[in-house]
Image: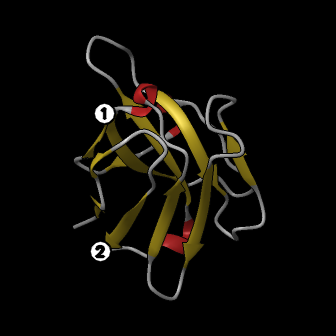
Amino acid sequence: QLQLVESGGGLVQPGGSLRLSCAASGFTLDDYAIGWFRQAPGKEREGVSCISNSGRSTNYADSVKGRFTISRDNARNTVYLQMNSLIAEDTAIYYCAADRIRYGCRLYVSSYDYWGQGTQVGVSS
């Protein structure tokens, strides 16, 4: 059974950091581009960052550029999202998802085939 499991969420103060992990089971992650998305209460799900299956290509939403870094370790079947300089607007449930695109990656919700259950990130003083 194909499964993605997110971890690493929590509550931090503004300016703090968190590292989210997305672990895959039941399939090999290196066949897929992986995206991180988030959804705040009352808002639509939005793309945060994605990384191609090789790891050579990444994309970021303007709102997180320079603060978030996506990476992957295909040997561990895991993708990471390092989040620094967190602000209140980053508060949301964060989801990872897999897209069987051959090259590059994209930040469109509809492009992704498999989704995790999400992990909560809260930024508050």
Q: Disc 2 marks which amino acid?
A: Gly
Screen quadrant of the C terminus: top left
Q: Nearer the viewer, residue 1 or 25?
A: 25
Q: Quarter-wise, where is residue 24 in the image?
A: bottom left
Bin the neighbour count of mark 2 within 10 Å (Cα to Cα): few under 14, some 14-19, many 20 and up: few
The answer to whether 116 appears left or right of 84 in the picture is left
> Looking at the image, is mark 1 or mark 2 earlier in the sequence?
2
How many numbered marks does the figure carry?
A: 2
* 45, above or below 68, in the image: above
Q: Disc 1 marks which amino acid?
A: Ser
Q: Nearer the viewer, residue 99 or 22?
A: 22
Task: Kindly state the secondary structure of the residue where label 2 is placed.
Answer: loop
x, y (%) of residue 69?
62, 56
**Would you name the residue on which mark 1 appears?**
124
Task: State the residue at coordinates (22%, 47%).
Answer: 117
Task: Kindly state the secondary structure of the residue where label 1 is placed.
Answer: loop
x, y (%) of residue 7?
28, 61
**Would you name the residue on which mark 2 appears?**
26
* 83, above or below 56, in the image: above
The answer to whether 19 appears left or right of 61 in the picture is left
Task: State the residue at coordinates (35%, 32%).
Answer: 91
Bin the neighbour count of mark 1 within 10 Å (Cα to Cα): few under 14, some 14-19, many 20 and up: some
Task: State the residue at coordinates (40%, 25%).
Answer: 45
Q: Quarter-wise, where is residue 93 in the image?
A: top left
Mark toward the viewer: 1 or 2:
1
x, y (%) of residue 68?
60, 50
Residue 4: image tag: none
Task: State the residue at coordinates (67%, 48%).
Answer: 105
